[in-house]
Amino acid sequence: MYHNVAWALQMGQMGKLIYIKIRAYILFAQRAIETEREVSVESIVTHPIPALKPADCCSTSKASVQAVSRKHIMWVYIIVGFFGLVSVGTYAMHEYYLYLSAYLWFGFIYGMCLQYGRFCFASAFRDLFAVGVPRMVVGIMIATILFSITSSLVASTGWSTFHAAPWSMHAVIAGIIFGVGMVFAGGCASGSLYKAGEGNGVSMLVILSISVTQSAFVDMGGWINYLVPKSWAESALTKGLPSSINVSDGWVDQYLAGYVWDQPVITFARLLGLEDHSLVGALYGNTLVGVILPAILLLTVVYIFWSRKRYVMDLKANEGRSANLIDHVRGFWAMITSSKRTAIAGLFLGVACGLQMFVIEGLRMKFGVKNAGTILQRLGHDYGISAKGTVFDPGYWYVTTQEAQWVGWVMQKLGWNNMDNIYFGWVNGIPSPAINPADWMSVALIGGAAVMALLNNEFKWKMPTKELAIWALIGGALMGIGSRLALGCNIGAFFVRTANGDISGWSFGLGMIGGAYIGVKFFNWYTEKKMAREMANINFDL
């Protein structure tokens, strides 16, 4: 009798544990769906499917094609027409606005590609660590390789706008902070922009949080100066900055001028003794050695630890044999081609990113400028120009800085002096969002994503729940801090730098992956604890 009762009690506790695990997984999946409105068949099926061939083991189901409503078509025409009218109208005012329109239309292309392929760095590593789905990691690597090839060809012509960043452990630490934040928020910096174009309220809150946090963080001084190492403070004072920049008052100012600027700038080409702008240095050093080989290594690791097991199980179930080397090569290729939408989007993204460098540099030569600040001044827009006459004008795809600028511009208008710090006052400025090239790119990115979402019947206004709103604000704040410490986000600090052979890009990427892993593990713990509290007063019938 005693053993029967003990057994029953054990079964009851086991039932509770199983229920908690299942409910925690469901909550985690629901959160991913609510923030992205995306479900992958791979994330649900965890057993061999006899109907599938080994080469199709990683494929996802095709969504049924639905007719696009007339209302959606109308809004597509309105959005495209609006951007077209802006381009034509401003060009009629002055040809200089062609420079801003170039940013606009590349942003539009990025938005369409991101939405079509559902490109999001947060979902890439969250799906990989949480449910073992490598689809988005594969897409990101495809885009990075294509971008690298295109940008190397551009670099060899001398028309590249890319500048490598200082490298040290700060990139890894910043990547960790950013990675945790993007998992908390349910989207990275670029992913949040395109999801905002789908009508996602959570993503809009993430963008707001990133923007406000960056703007405030770069201008924080006072008691925070006590956290600045003495060596940073002393080094910052030796940089010869103008008196308008109060470099001794501000943690970020002293971090930048006293530490980051003192770090070496390293690319794979330079490590091999080659020039970044030579054909050999760009293609062999920065692309082959710096991108293609590491990407293949990373994808091989992903296949071995996440995709191989399912492929082998399917092969054994379908053909009754073990996998050999040729089979694993086929399995690796099946993983690469598992999602055609993501692969196609990655291809177009990579090519477009490289072409933007070529186009922007060509326009700079045409107008005889090195920075858009000169163009704005010629047009009579002097407000918000930095102390050295520049504004943020990367010449390639970038996300977070322009988001900080529009908040900085608003705060400056309200009386907060943002022009006495390095970030705004010396480097990027805070021009009006109406004439800010990078802001045109981000707004158009949202518009491009909206157009693609409307054409795919994936646009829907979605208000955030209270819990998701809180996580969005926390995650956005962490991404904002991580972006400023790394001098960029998942696009500027990882995607662009990695594709151009900058070692700091891979450093940030490794940190971001580690941060995403920490974020996923935290949410696993959080959802299980939440379910355990809900189960505390529930009794199972034995």
Image: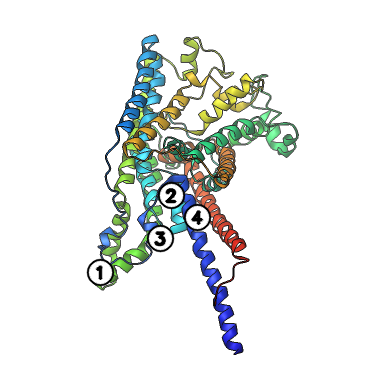
Q: In which quarter of the image is residue 144?
A: top left
Q: Name the residue under label 2.
A: 124
Question: Which residue in the rendered view is the most extreme toward the bottom?
Answer: 1
- Kind of residue sitting beneath label 2: Ala
- Kind of residue sitting beneath label 3: Trp
- The dot on residue 306 is 3
Question: 533 or 380, which is in the foreground?
Answer: 533
Q: Quadrant of residue 267?
A: top left
Looking at the rendered structure, the secondary structure element under dot 1 is helix
Q: Where is residue 460 in the image (x, y as percent from the top left)?
A: 41, 39
In the image, is residue 196 above or below residue 242? below
Q: Which is more foreground, mark 3 or mark 1?
A: 1
Task: State how the image is colored.
Answer: rainbow
Question: 319 or 5, which is in the foreground?
Answer: 5
Q: Mark 1 points at which residue?
A: 318
Confirm or deny contact between disc 4 and disc 1 (CB under 8 A). no
Give me the C-alpha separation between circle 4 and circle 3: 19 Å
